[in-house]
């Protein structure tokens, strides 16, 4: 396969759906939140931003996104704020509804916020044109809509589906997998995920991943377990919240294959429910966007989130929100006056924003863009090699750091 053909097809049609599939494992119920956070003890000019995410919806609720934003505001306001002024966070519940997401964007315009930071919504095609027309940057969205990777006012802090699955394929092969079977739902979006997985395995010198499809209505996964485990190779579980069904069937089968996935599928909670350190998920090969939460880089976030039941510090959407606010603060502190226009100019010209080790230095210069139509707002092409150890997600090896898959994504093959 010619990689460019795959990349063009994917960018145009499937990023939003794959984002929803991966994020499903992170969803939970939550309360309505339309609050703001500020600190009256700071005397400088207030800096107003917005964050939105679905709550109390029928889909993937993300109460931890606004909760993390508010926790960050409390923390930064207790440490001097933004240029001596309070950070004010306005939250909006987009309810998993494109019409509501559009209303949130309209509110961002009417509130004259300087940015929308660290949000979660599948409706990028609805809210990004509104933000773009108003000149408001969308910084560090969770990457679950295609518009986040193509609109010039979007500034992603990670590489989304293409990067994490290409990196995962590489990690599987480099971890000793002689063959890989990717288990996914029988939908077009998940098929594209499988192709990025294979792009990674092939780039690392392995074979393309075997494609094992599960009908959306399936409840008995024994046939798919048998197909995936045949031959003794590694089994990659790409099923979101349904990963538990597969793992249960896998345990019942008595198979001993090595398991793997990207963050949000094989979770510490699932590991605990299947035997913890002595269970089948021990040693599972995991690929993430960021360091594990045990890494010192997350120390401030863990402390700020302590006691907040809406925040899961291992949730990718929550983590991305913290990273996005960290990047926002770095950029805003470089400005003489914090405005949306000035912030956009700074983000487009910065040589690298320091996130304290949560990502490599972030830049959105033209020279660092991924040169793929539809994915050209991806600048951070790194991921992290992780593993489930003692029931928790940790670095795969001592001294591990970020792995860059730009070459795998841009090299033509076949």
Image: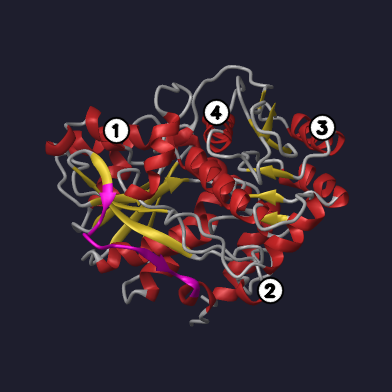
Residue picked out by circle 1: 270
Relative side of 246 to 148, left or right: left
Cα–Cα gap, marks 2 and 3: 30 Å
Q: Label 1 to label 4, Cα distance in Å?
A: 24 Å
Q: Secondary structure at mark 1?
A: helix
Image quadrant where residue 105 sits: top right
The one of 168 and 75 positioned closer to us in this rendering = 75
Q: Which residue is mark 2?
A: 366
Which of the two discs, 1 and 4, labels the residue nearer the N terminus?
4
Q: Which residues are magenta?
A: 394-406
Residue 185 position (above or below residue 241): below
Q: Is residue 138 left or right of residue 223?
A: right
| Mark sitting earlier along the chain (2/4) | 4
Q: CA distance from mark 3 to mark 1?
A: 39 Å
**Which residue does the numbered mark 3 point to in the structure image?**
107
Q: Does dot 2 land on a helix, a strand or a loop?
A: helix
């Amino acid at each position: 396969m010619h990689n460019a053909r795959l990349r063009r097809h994917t960018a145009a049609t499937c990023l939003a759906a794959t984002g929803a599939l991966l994020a499903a494992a992170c969803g939970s119920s939550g309360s309505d939140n339309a609050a703001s956070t500020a600190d009256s003890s700071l005397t400088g000019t207030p800096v107003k931003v917005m964050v939105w995410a679905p709550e109390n919806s029928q889909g993937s609720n993300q109460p931890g996104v606004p909760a993390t934003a508010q926790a960050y505001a409390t923390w930064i306001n207790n440490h001097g704020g933004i240029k001596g002024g309070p950070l004010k966070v306005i939250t909006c519940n987009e309810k998993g509804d494109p019409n509501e997401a559009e209303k949130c964007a309209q509110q961002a315009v009417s509130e004259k916020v300087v940015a929308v930071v660290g949000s979660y919504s599948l409706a990028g095609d609805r809210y990004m044109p509104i933000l773009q027309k108003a000149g408001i940057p969308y910084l560090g969205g969770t990457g679950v809509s295609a518009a986040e990777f193509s609109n010039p006012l979007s500034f992603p802090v990670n590489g989304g589906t293409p990067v994490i699955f290409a990196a995962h394929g590489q990690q599987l092969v480099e971890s000793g997998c002689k063959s890989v079977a990717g288990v996914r739902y029988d939908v077009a979006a998940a098929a594209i995920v499988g192709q990025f997985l294979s792009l990674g395995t092939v780039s690392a010198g392995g074979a393309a991943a075997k494609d094992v499809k599960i009908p959306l209505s399936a409840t008995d996964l024994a046939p798919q377990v048998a197909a995936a485990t045949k031959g003794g190779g590694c089994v990659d579980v790409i099923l979101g919240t349904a990963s538990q069904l597969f793992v249960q069937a896998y345990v019942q089968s008595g198979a001993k294959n090595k398991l793997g996935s990207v963050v949000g599928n094989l979770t510490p909670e699932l590991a605990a429910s299947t035997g913890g350190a002595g269970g089948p998920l021990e040693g599972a090969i995991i690929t993430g966007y960021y360091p594990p939460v045990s890494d010192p880089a997350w120390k401030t976030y863990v402390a700020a989130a302590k006691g907040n039941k809406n925040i899961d510090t291992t949730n990718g959407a929550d983590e991305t929100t913290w990273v996005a606010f960290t990047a926002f603060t770095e950029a805003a502190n470089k400005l003489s006056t914090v405005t949306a226009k000035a912030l956009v100019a700074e983000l487009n010209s910065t040589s690298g924003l320091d996130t304290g080790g949560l990502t490599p230095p972030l830049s959105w210069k033209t020279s660092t863009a991924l040169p793929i139509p539809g994915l050209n707002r991806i600048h951070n092409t790194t991921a992290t090699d992780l593993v489930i150890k003692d029931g928790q997600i940790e670095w795969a090896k001592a001294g591990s750091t970020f792995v860059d898959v730009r070459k795998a994504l841009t090299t033509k093959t076949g």
